[in-house]
Amino acid sequence: MAQFSRRQMIAGSLSAAALAPVCHLTPARAAAPQIGKQAPGFYRYRHGDFEVTAVTDGAIRQPLADSYVVNASRDQVNAALGAMHLERDRIFAPLTPVVINTGTRLVVIDTGLGPAAFEQSKGAGGQFHTNLRAAGIDAAAVDAVVLSHLHRDHVGGLLTKDGHPAFPNAEIFVPAADWRFWSDDGNLTRMTAGSIPEINFRNNKQVFASLKNRVTLYDADKEVQPGILSVPAYGHTPGHTAHLVTSGNAKVLLQADLTAFSATLFVANPGWHVFFDMDGAAAESSRRRIYDMAASEKLLVQGYHLPFPSLGQIERQGSAYRFVPATWNSSL
Ligand SMILES: [Zn+2]
C-alpha cells in the first residue's frame, strides 16, 4: 500500500472536497442546439443476389376531403384513422421509391414528387434525390427507371429542379396502358379543370416533353428488367402495375399504389374506394387478388405509400388485411 504523509492526506482530502462540490455545482452548459430536421431516409436489404434500397421521398400530410373515400363517410374514415392512432381529419402518405441493384443493372422503381416539390411542400416531399445521394447511389449510374403508373408522386423525380433529366443515362419504362391514356388529348377534354386527373395529365405532358425518346412501353406479365416481372394491378389508373422482384428463392412484391395514397387505411378497409382511383371496383379487385396471393405465398411486400421503410408482410384479417412491418436489420 502506498504510504502517504499526513500532509499529503490533508491535501488530498482537501482537493477532493474542493473538487466534489465544483463538479456537482458546475452549471449545465448552454443546451445543445436541436437539429430541427429529419435524417436522410433510406433502408437497404439483401434480396437473393440483389441489393434493394428503399429511399424515402418524404411524406405528405393533407386535409381529409369529405369525399376522400367515395363509399365510406367522413366519420367512418376518421374512426379508422383513430383506430390506427393516426391524426383525424388528415391523410398522411409516405412516398418510397425503390432502387434495385441486380449486380449488373441499377434500376429505380418510381421517383417521388421531384425536387421542384421540395420547397412547395416545405421540405415534406421531393427528397428522393437528396436521399439517393445520401444512400451512396449516383443517379447517372442508373440504367433503367421503371414506373408503376403516371401519377405526379411517381414521375416527378424524373426531372431535376431546373427541368433536366435527373437520370441522364437511364431508359424509362412505362406501362403501355397508362401511356396510351395519359397521352390521348381526347381524355384531357373530358377532365374537370383543376381535378386530380387534369393536374396529372398536364404534369405528364410537361415531364415527358423532354423524355419521350427515352421511353419504352411495357405490358403486364413481362420481365421488364432482369428479375423484375410486371404484375397487372389496374384500377388506380388504367395501366397501374405492381412488380414481383425475384432473385433465387427471394421474392418481394412492389405493390405501388394497390392501397392508394394513405395505404394503411385501405389495407384495413380493402373495400373502400379512394376518389382518385380511376376505376374503384377494378382497383379493389386488383387489391384483393394481389393481397390474397401475397398472404398465401407469404411474400415480402414493399409498398410505395406504406409506413417507411414500407417493407413487411400482408396477412388476411377476416375479409380485410393487416400490414406487419419487417423487422429492422442492422446488417445485410
Ligand atoms: Zn402514389
Image (cartoon, helix red, strand yellow):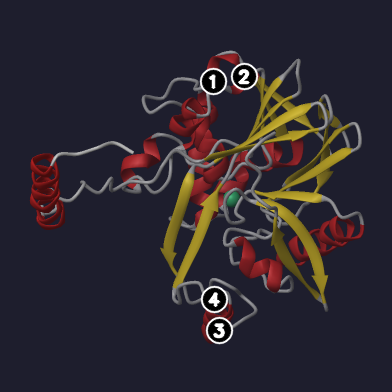
The mark that comes first in sequence, 2 or 3, is 3
Q: Which mark is residue 13?
A: none
Q: Residues within 10 Å of mark 3 (few under 14, many from 20)?
A: some
- The percent position of residue 319, horizontal first and vertical second, equals 82, 77
Circle 2/circle 4 CB separation < 8 Å: no
The mark that comes first in sequence, 1 or 4, is 4
Instruction: Write down the residue under mark 3.
Output: 79
Is residue 237 left or right of 1 when viewed as pictured?
right
The mark that comes first in sequence, 1 or 3, is 3
Disc 2/disc 3 C-alpha distance (Å): 43 Å
- The three-letter code of the residue at mark 2 reads Val
In the image, residue 120 sits, relative to residue 193, either above or below, namely above
- The three-letter code of the residue at mark 1 reads Ala
Residue at 44% across / 38% down in the picture?
40
Disc 1/disc 3 C-alpha distance (Å): 42 Å
Instruction: Write down the residue under mark 4.
Output: 81
- Can residue 97 be seen in the rendering of this structure? yes
- The percent position of residue 324, horizontal first and vertical second, equals 71, 62
Front residue of this view, candidates 216 and 38: 38
Circle 1/circle 2 CB separation < 8 Å: yes
Q: Residues within 10 Å of mark 4 (few under 14, many from 20)?
A: many
Q: Secondary structure at mark 1?
A: helix
- The three-letter code of the residue at mark 3 reads Ala
Instruction: Write down the residue under mark 2.
Output: 142
Disc 2/disc 4 C-alpha distance (Å): 38 Å
Q: Secondary structure at mark 4?
A: helix
Q: Secondary structure at mark 2?
A: loop
- The percent position of residue 274, horizontal first and vertical second, equals 61, 67
Q: Residues within 10 Å of mark 1 (few under 14, many from 20)?
A: some
Instruction: Write down the residue under mark 1.
Output: 139
